[in-house]
């Protein structure tokens, strides 16, 4: 990728936030996994961080199963429902990350100690890295 292309992409993404994508303005997302919650590590010691709470995951899977079963009788409707489900999951994911960002910003505003804030930021960055890697299937 040329330097010019890289600069254009950075400009395009500048100011883009998960809060903007989620269409939220500081509301708290119930049931989200906090930045401090991590699961066991993978072989490369990168933490596996659940993107959704276990209840949300069960709900999404149950809805997906129902969509697949319905495909036999109404394929077009099943595809429309799948699109809606995926869009809803993406919106929910953006809300979760936006909520985490709001919590971090609240800590900054309260003037929490640098070491605590840095640790929270490190955890948040690891969650973003884990999610981004999954998006790119790395």
Image: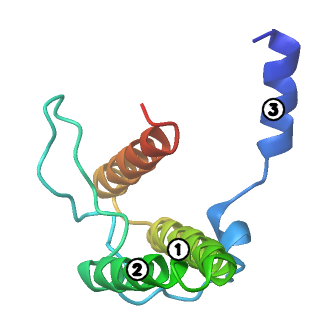
Residue at horizontal 66%, vertical 83%? 77
Discs 3, 1 touching: Cβ within 8 Å: no
Q: Nearer the viewer, mark 2 or mark 1?
A: 2
Residue at horizontal 67%, vertical 82%? 24
* Direction front: furthest residue: 73
Residue with the mark numbered 2: 60
- Estimate the spatial distance between the alpha carbons at disc 3 and disc 1, rounded to whole Å: 25 Å
What percent of the width, then of the height, locates residue 89?
A: 53, 73
| Quarter in which the N terminus is drawn | top right
Residue with the mark numbered 3: 9
Residue at horizontal 46%, vertical 73%? 103
| Quarter in which the C terminus is drawn | top left
| Residue situated in front as seen by the camera: 64 or 77 | 77
Discs 2, 1 touching: Cβ within 8 Å: yes
Residue with the mark numbered 1: 89
The quadrant in which residue 45 appears is top left
Q: Secondary structure at mark 1?
A: helix
Sequence-wise first label, 3 or 2: 3
Callout 3: 10 Å neighbours few (<14), some, many (20+)? few
What percent of the width, then of the height, locates residue 72?
A: 51, 79
Q: Is residue 2 above or below residue 39?
A: above
- Estimate the spatial distance between the alpha carbons at disc 3 and disc 2, rounded to whole Å: 32 Å
């Amino acid at each position: 990728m040329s330097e010019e292309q890289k600069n254009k992409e950075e400009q395009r993404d500048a100011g883009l936030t998960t809060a903007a994508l989620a269409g939220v303005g500081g509301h708290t997302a119930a049931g989200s996994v906090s930045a401090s919650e991590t699961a066991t590590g993978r072989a490369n010691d990168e933490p596996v961080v659940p993107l959704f709470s276990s209840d949300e995951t069960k709900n999404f899977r149950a809805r997906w199963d129902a969509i697949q079963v319905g495909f036999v009788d109404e394929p077009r409707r099943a595809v429309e429902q799948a699109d809606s489900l995926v869009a809803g999951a993406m919106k929910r994911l953006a809300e979760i990350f936006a909520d985490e960002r709001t919590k971090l910003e609240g800590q900054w505003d309260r003037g929490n100690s640098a070491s605590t804030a840095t640790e929270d930021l490190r955890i948040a960055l690891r969650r973003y890295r884990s999610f981004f890697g999954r998006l790119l299937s790395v």
